[in-house]
Amino acid sequence: MTITLLLLFAGVGSACLGSTPTAPSTSEPVAVAETLQGTLSVNGARTHSFTVDRAGDVTARLTILSDQAAIVGLGLGTWNGTTCAIILANDAATIGSSVAGTAEATGDFCARISDIGLLVTSVDYIIDVSHF
């Protein structure tokens, strides 16, 4: 029995001698896309939180406003469960405007849209957020 096991291990070892080691696969990070939507009222603000699982680029882009001429505030920040601490802001955002930065660590982040005093009626919006 002992001789059989030794021969078995010898056979396995010789089979590995001819193989070439391969490096572990390192796949490129895949961007995560999130759609944030709602209605922004006159003199109002809306905050949406999201989680970033990898350090990397984070972008919030205002893709739809029901009033295409509306100008609003758009910001990105960190979320502590209660408050969105804005780090990047565009205080004159229109359709197509974005704010972008780099998350240096994983964690909870937020996107915020706000009336900067120019809305005369509520507007529906969509913000597309991408991150890694």
Image (cartoon, rainbow, N blue to C red):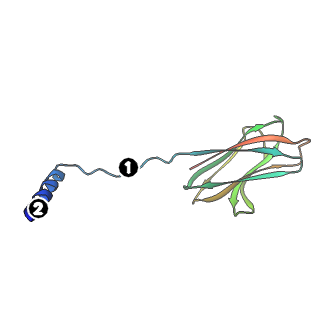
Q: Which mark is residue 25?
A: 1
* Residue 122 screen position, x and y as percent: 87, 42
Work out which quarter of the rendered image holds the N terminus and state it.
bottom left
Local crowd size for mark 2, using a 10 Å CA cut-off: few (<14), some (14–19), many (≥20): few
Q: Residue flagged by tag 2: what amino acid is it?
A: Leu
Residue matched to label 2: 6
* Residue 129 screen position, x and y as percent: 66, 46
Residue at screen point 71% across, 43% down: 127
Q: Which mark is residue 132?
A: none
Name the one closer to the observer, 114 or 19.
Answer: 19
Local crowd size for mark 1, using a 10 Å CA cut-off: few (<14), some (14–19), many (≥20): few
* Residue 110 screen position, x and y as percent: 70, 55
Vertical comparison of 107 with 46: above or below: below
Q: Which is nearer the N-term, disc 2 or disc 1?
A: 2
Residue at screen point 13% across, 61% down: 5
Name the one closer to the observer, 108 or 87.
Answer: 108
* Residue 56 screen position, x and y as percent: 56, 53
Residue at screen point 83% across, 46% down: 40
